[in-house]
């Protein structure tokens, strides 16, 4: 499947998929991830330390202090990494509704992390943005 770069087609094909479970953001002062920790949804090395997005239950099990309990929404459209304006349009629409969002772009899709209490609403907003009713 070829990645899509056209903004109109990207928005029309969003297909937001709300993932089960609650994730959290964790930061570690050192790059070493604790032994036995289940794989993170996303690790990212910053100058200040390593950020992990992982299941809330996993962070609690490992005794890691967590922030921003959230749900993940995958935008199932295969977005090109060089697409222009896609996340800007999506996050602006969520911002207009007062919904916080942390976006992560991966190779095939973009993933949005939104507050647990607003996840269903965010999914509905994205479906409306795409013109989809499913």
Image (cartoon, helix red, strand yellow):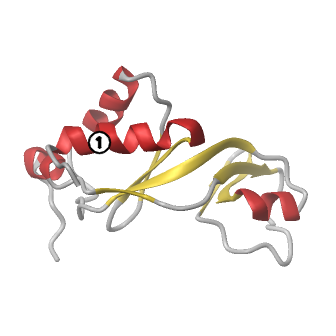
Give the residue furthest to the front.
133
Res 7 quadrant in image: top left
Task: Give the camera-side residue of 65 and 115.
Answer: 115
Does residue 109 appear to the left or right of 40 in the view shown?
left
Image vertical order of residue 36 relative to residue 98, above or below? below
- Image location (x, y in percent) of residue 84: 20, 43
Residue at the spot 64% in from the left edge and 54% down from the top edge: 23
Task: Give the camera-side residue of 28 and 47.
Answer: 28
Residue at the spot 84% in from the left edge and 47% down from the top edge: 65
Res 54 quadrant in image: bottom right
Provide the residue designation for mark 1.
126
Q: In which quarter of the image is the C terminus?
A: bottom left
Give the residue furthest to the right.
63
* Disc 1, SS: helix
Q: Can residue 70 be seen in this view?
A: yes
Res 116 quadrant in image: top right
Task: Give the camera-side residue of 10 and 115.
Answer: 115
- Image location (x, y in percent) of residue 14: 23, 53
Mark 1 crowd level (few <14, some 14–19, many ≥20, 10 Å Cα): many
């Amino acid at each position: 499947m070829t990645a899509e770069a056209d903004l109109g087609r990207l928005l029309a094909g969003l297909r937001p998929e709300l993932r089960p479970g609650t994730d959290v953001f964790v930061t570690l002062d050192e790059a070493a991830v604790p032994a036995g920790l289940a794989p993170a949804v996303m690790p990212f090395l910053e100058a200040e330390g390593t950020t992990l997005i992982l299941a809330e239950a996993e962070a609690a099990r490992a005794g890691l202090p967590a922030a921003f309990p959230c749900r993940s929404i995958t935008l199932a459209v295969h977005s090109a990494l060089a697409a222009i304006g896609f996340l800007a349009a999506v996050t602006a629409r969520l911002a207009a509704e007062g919904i916080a969002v942390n976006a992560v772009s991966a190779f095939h899709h973009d993933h949005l992390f939104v507050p647990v209490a607003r996840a269903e609403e965010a999914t509905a907003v994205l479906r409306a943005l795409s013109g989809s009713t499913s």
